[in-house]
Structures are given as structure tokens and as C-alpha cells.
Amino acid sequence: MASHTLVAAFIFLALVSLVLASDPSPVQDFCVGIDDPNRAVFVNGRFCKDPANATADDFYLSGLHLAGNTSNLQGSVVTPANVVQIPGLNTLGISMVRIDFRPFGLNPPHTHPRATEILVVLEGTLFVGFVTSSSGNRLITKTLNQGDVFVFPEGLIHFQKNTGRTRAVALAGMSSQNSGVIMIPSTIFGSNPAIPDDILSQAFQADKRVLNILRAPYRPRIGEVTDSEEQL
Ligand SMILES: *[C@@H]1O[C@H](CO)[C@@H](O)[C@H](O)[C@H]1NC(C)=O
Ligand SMILES: *[C@@H]1O[C@H](CO)[C@@H](O)[C@H](O)[C@H]1NC(C)=O
């Protein structure tokens, strides 16, 4: 009886800790991250600099006023300001990005495995949306103009599309020092090496011809697709 209660309590606690999983809360003023090649293990975050040696530059980044280069397939580019660029963000659970869109540019459907995103449009018009993980994968969308703010909940697939004839610019705050990004098209169809045909054919109920079309934009990256029907 008592052991059942213990097991139940343990499972409950495990679930609670899963539900509450997020970047660690800071247990000191700050912990400026350093890359220490002498340490063999990589902990969740980075090793810390001696606080006495921290400088203003550890907490500083310049250049976010500059537009990114949107001359790419999708017509959008993300300029990050996370723990990689700002080591002082280590353990603080926050970061930001600038997103530039050329006219009709798209930030393709993607997820951030570790962050909720809160976005503000500085310039232009964006059609944005996310899809819920349950409740029948409901699509929730909104057209945003200058000054409008929108939230993309942690882990959910979302996108932003510039629907205007002029460029668009947005800033977004992320609830992680390193939110991560999983671009759905390139992750599924441009992985290296490629996810085997039979897996994708079955998953998407599509034949190899369709898969080859979907993989085409990433072909240089996944050069080692060995399938003899690759030339279809
Ligand atoms: C802090 O800076 C001093 C002076 O530059 C240096 O000698 C010392 O090794 C540094 N401490 C750490 C822990 O990096
Ligand atoms: C932008 O990127 C394109 C494609 O990579 C490149 O050809 C072009 O020179 C870049 N433009 C600038 C201003 O860096």
C-alpha cells in the first residue's frame, strides 16, 4: 500500500518536472559562458567565467540594427542574439532574434524545442500562425502590422510570411538562452544523410517522385542519396 503511494508520488513528481522543464533558473547573479576545450563534458549550458573577470562585453552585442541578407530560397533570414553571441546570457533563460523578410519572403514552418517566442513587427505586414499539438492540430493565424505583438507557444510549429510588397522586419524574444530551431522542410527532406525513402513514403503517403521533388532544394546538402532512382 505504502509502496504504491510512493510509486504514485514518484510518477507524479516525474511528470511535474517534465511539465515544468525549462532553462535552469539562475542561482547566482550571472554565469558568463566560456568554451573550455580542456573539459571533456558539456553540461546543460556552459562553464562559467570567474565573475570577477566578467566585463561589459560579455553582456553586449552590436549590429542588430542591420538588415540581414534575404537573398535565399525562402526570402527571410534570422539574425540571432543568443548565448553564442552574448556569453553573459548563460543560465538566464532568455535571448532574442531579428528576422528580415524580403517582399513575400517566408520564415518556413519550424519549431523551437526550448522556447516560447514573443514577436513584435517593426516594419511591414506579416501573416503568422501556429498549429496546436492537440485539439485536432488547430491552425491559429493572424495578420500583423507595425507594432503588433504575437506569441508562439513553446515547441509548436509556426511560420511568418511577409504579405507586403515592401520588406518586413521583426524582433522576437525567446524564453531560452539557446532556443534551437527545427525547420520542418529542411529537417524532414534535407537531413544528412537523408531519411530513407520508405520511411518518408509511408509517413507522407507519397511516392518517390514526390519525395524527390520535396528533396530537390536540399540536394547539394544531401549529396549521398544513394537510391538508384534518384534521377527520376
Ligand atoms: C581572471 O583574470 C586574471 C587577469 O587577467 C587572470 O590572471 C585569471 O586567470 C582570470 N581568472 C580566471 C578564472 O579566468
Ligand atoms: C547576399 O547573399 C547572396 C547569396 O548568398 C550573395 O550572392 C550576395 O552577395 C549577398 N549580398 C550581400 C550584400 O552580402
Image (spheres, rainbow, N blue to C red):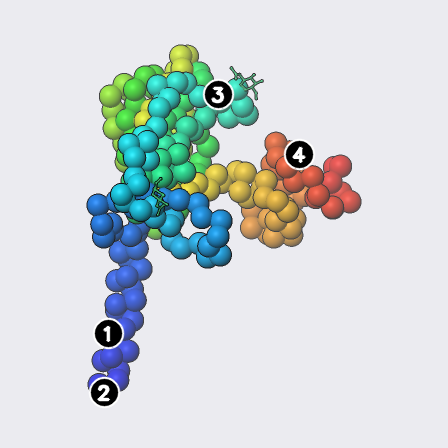
In this rendering, position of residue 197 left or right of residue 25:
right
Q: Is disc 2 surrounded by few (<14), some (14 to 19) or many (20+) residues within 10 Å? A: few
Marks 2 & 4, CB-CB < 8 Å contact: no
Residue at point 30%, 55% (across, down) = 21
| Residue topped by disc 4 | 220
x, y percentage for residue 56? 28, 32
Tag 3: amino acid:
Thr
Q: Earlier in the sequence, mark 4 or mark 1?
A: 1
Above-or-below relation of 195 to 3 = above
Label 1: how many residues lie within 10 Å, few (<14), some (14-19) or many (20+)? Answer: few
Residue 88, image quadrant: top left
Nearest to the observer: residue 160 or residue 173: 173
- Name the one closer to the observer, 164 or 135: 164
Label 3: which residue?
70
Is residue 31 or residue 95 the one in the foreground? Answer: 31
Circle 2: residue type: Met
- Quadrant of the image for the N terminus? bottom left
